[in-house]
Structure formats: structure tokens, C-alpha cells
Image (cartoon, rainbow, N blue to C red):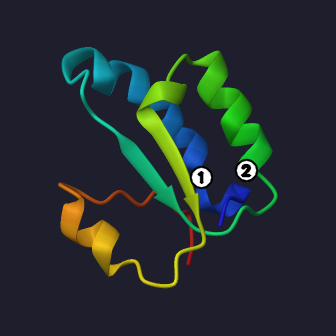
Amino acid sequence: EFNKRKNHQFIFRNIPSIIQENPNLLFIFLGSDGTERIHMEKLARQLNIQDHIRFMGYQKEIGKFVKIADIGISSSRAE
């Protein structure tokens, strides 16, 4: 879910430097929209990283995404 507690902004603000060295990376975000989804889409455009991000929404079976992922990132301040 996109909310302030999950701190997705931290990840987004670091993506430009990451893709500078790895331009083929794609960041896939799973979870319900939450209160911050629209803000995160706007931030992606401002940082010019929208082509490297996919918002997949809520997924009942996340296993298929885990299988294709090279890494997983959590920036959550609390769970």
C-alpha cells in the first residue's frame, strides 16, 4: 500500500542514481493504491524515472513477481 509509513519516496529519490549506472532496471511496486499512489506517480514524472517504474496494484499471488525479481526492497518505517 502506498502510504507515508511505507516511505516509498526514499526509494524513488534514489532511483535516478541507480539507473544512471544500470539503465535497464525496472522497479515493480505491488500493493493497493493507498493515500500516496497519486503523489508517487507525480514524483516519478518529476524525477524522470516513470519509464523505470511499474505500479502493479494489489496482487493476490505475489509469488510470480518474487520469482522474476533480482532483489526486493523495503523502505517501510514500521510494519
- Vertical position of residue 6 compared to residue 49: above or below: below
CA gap, disc 2 and disc 1:
12 Å
Badge 1 is on which residue? 7
> Image quarter for residue 67?
bottom left
Residue in view at x 60 percent, y 61 percent: 6
Question: In this view of the protein, which residue sits in the foreground, 10 or 32?
Answer: 32
Q: Residue at x 30, y 23 (%)?
A: 19
Residue at 67% across, 29% down: 43
What x and y, as percent, mark residue 57?
Answer: 61, 63
Q: Position of residue 17 (x, y in %)?
A: 34, 20
Closest to the camera, between mark 2 and mark 1, is: 2
Q: Residue at x 54, y 16 (%)?
A: 48
**Element at badge 2?**
helix
In the picture, the quarter occupied by the C terminus is: bottom right
Quadrant of the image containing the N terminus: bottom right
Instruction: Examine the rendering and report whether any part of residue 11 can be seen.
Output: no
Callout 2 amino acid = Arg
Q: Nearer the viewer, residue 4 or 43?
A: 43
Classify residue 54 as left or right of residue 5. left
Tag 1, which secondary structure? Answer: loop
Q: Residues within 10 Å of mark 2 (few under 14, many from 20)?
A: some
Task: Name the side, left or right, on which 59 lies relative to 2.
Answer: left
- Residue 37 is marked as 2
